[in-house]
Image: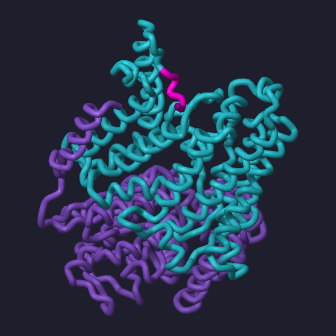
Amino acid sequence: MPRPKDILARHETVLLLVIAVEVILFQVLGRNFLTGGNVSNVFRHSVEIGLLALAMTPVILTGGIDLSVGSLMGLCAVLFGMMVKLLGLDPWVAGCLAVLCGALGGAVNAGLVAGLKLPPLIVTLGTFSLFRGLAEAFTKGSESYSGFSDGFLALGNSDLAGVPAQVWILLVVGFAIWFLVHRTTYGRSLRAIGFAEEGARYAGLPVARNLSVAYTMAGAVAGLAAVILVARLGEARANAGTGYELLAITAVVLGGVSIFGGSGNVVGTMLGWISLAILNNGLTRISDYEIFGEKVSSVARELSGLLTGLLLLGALALAMATKALALRRPTKQPASDSQTP
Amino acid sequence: MNRKTFLLSAALLAALPFFSCNKTEDAGKLSVGFLLKSKGNQYFVTCEKGARAAAEELDIDLRVDGPISADPAKQNEIVENWITDGLDVIVAACENKDSLSTALRKAQAAGIKVVTYDADAQPDARSFFANQATAQGIGEKLIDTTAELTGKEGEFAIITGTLTSANLNEWIAAIKARVEEKYPGMKLVDIRPCDDNKDKAQQEATNLLSAHPDLKAIVAVCSPAVPGAAEAVKQVGKTGAVKVVGLGLPSENRAYIKEGVTQAIILWNPEDLGYLAVQAGVALKKGDLSKSAENFSAGKLGKLEIKGDSIILGTPMAFTKENIDGFDF
């Protein structure tokens, strides 16, 4: 049985606290926050970012980063739209192909990072522009594809067993990535690479191959997120997913994954994502307030960027502070570094 | 987390729905959501002003929201949140036609009345579109204003965006038809494209001024061409002698209008557009506006024509030295 202090020091506990504070705040200040319909919306509107954050976790665990996933979403969305609308493919077939295209895009990153040993930040900064540029070139920047079948749109807009359909996909992907990271030797190797890449290589780990898998997987998941986004909006356009990569990275870092690699876990990422999703939705719940006798439309939305920044910095600072508190008097059982069992 | 803390927080969470307090909502009042394309755009801020005026008149609960900068995905989220809130009416300006239509159809399926304004959705995703102006209305207002300034005679030239632009060509066609019908003394001498570029417009205008020394007016039908033409007229030293009239935003032309280089800007009043859209949405909900209606009495705007499923705001207005300070978009 761990001591209360150690529990408090765990990053996940801090995040749960943050989430609880958010929920209470928005329930009291906003309208219709804790209603069934709105709770669905919280998750429905953020599944794409959740998927990207999940796929980003293994990459960041290796000490890498993938800035290209948002742009890759745009490219996959456009390719999907073209396959359905110009080639007349069935949307489900096209969806699978879009995921494949995403994996190919990820493989480009993988080749450059693992094969040529270029820094991930620079490689994905390049593909960040490249993928979005391709999407814009294909559509001349302005064309978009719409008019998808109702059956396909249901993926983004319907409920399955009372839960938005796409959330089930997120849960499956989430479990798969959790299993991969925490229950396989592959997952251990990711952390080993993150701690010391050279060391991992001398230890005989297939570093290049394992890195490639992480980046390719991130690409495939970006493709999947693109298909889900198109199903939700009903339109495939080159600007799909703009800025999502930074939100995904925010969720991962908020979740306690070290940006230098080596430590962190998938549950943390999920909690980080949920706290971001709640913030995003909750702010829209606070709207049309009378302030000093003057009606102000959704005063809180303007604060979205500010609050996201505060959330990230505040949660990380709080986590550091509680950890320091717990470590002040060393005990028989030192606080774990929020790592896996 | 140990069991005690878990149980405690679970109990707190379960109790939360009972703590909620309703905000400015009044039971019984109609609730209307007014969606902007972006909050950072003065044009839409002016639309909002009109919407608020209509809300006050009709005694409804108006909720205004929109993305900080144009963002179709954010618009979609706002509409979905309004659906879960069970609003009665949604009045929306769509960032792009298709991305919002899915959400608006969903709103309609949930029994919410939908009216679009400024930028339309797919026809099956809304009941009516509050249309700011028809091509004919814009073209006629442009040439009528010009005719008034030139005494209904003399040469004039048009600067357009591109020669292939569909809506600009419609306006030009309306101008030509009006000249033929009403102003026999006026003569269109040239139509020059400026590729939606202010510098190119200035260059074209300079060429026009030297090629046609008797030119009385330049009509600029795309917005970058208005300040471009004004700058040319000013530099050539023909301020006042050659009139400049065009379709554009007051903010882009304020300086030239005050100097007397540009005589008038033609545009609809966004405030009226917002007012009309909210009026129409509420009338639709109350059953005062039916699909087959041929006109609509929009409060202080009076009786407006309905063409198909668009409610026409009417002829655009002219912004001149006298009234331009009242508009900051």
Compared across the picture, whether B287 is left or right of A313 comes to left
Compare residues A52 and B323 and report the one nearer the observer.
A52
Which residue range is magenta in the image? A336-341
Image quadrant where residue A293 sits: top left
Q: Determine the residue positioned at 45% across, 8% down.
A: A330
Residue A337 lies within the magenta run: yes
- Residue B108 lies, in percent from the top left, at 35, 77
Please state which of residues A333 and B110 is positioned toward the viewer in this rendering.
Answer: A333
Please tell me how many numbered marks the rendered image carries.
0
Q: Position of residue B129 (x, y in %)?
A: 40, 78
**Horizontal arrangement in the rendering, residue A84 relative to residue A308 (left or right):** right
Give the percent coordinates (x, y) of residue A43.
42, 54
Which residue is outermost to the front? A1
Residue found at the very far right of the displayed protein: A116
The answer to whether residue B186 shows anywhere in this view is: no
The residue depicted at 41 percent of the width and 33 percent of the height is A15
Question: Which shade is chain A?
Answer: cyan
Magenta highlight on residue A145: no
Which residue is at 50% across, 52% downward? B69
From the image, give the main secondary structure of the stretch colored magenta. loop
The colour with which the image depicts chain B is purple
Instruction: Judge by depth and name the residue closer to the eye, A337 or A42.
Output: A337
Side of A219 relative to A164 (left or right): right
Q: Is residue B305 visible?
A: yes
Residue A50 placed where, x, y %?
A: 52, 49
Q: Quadrant of residue B223?
A: bottom right
Quadrant where the image shows the N terminus of chain A: top left
Q: Residue at x 66, y 31 (%)?
A: A191
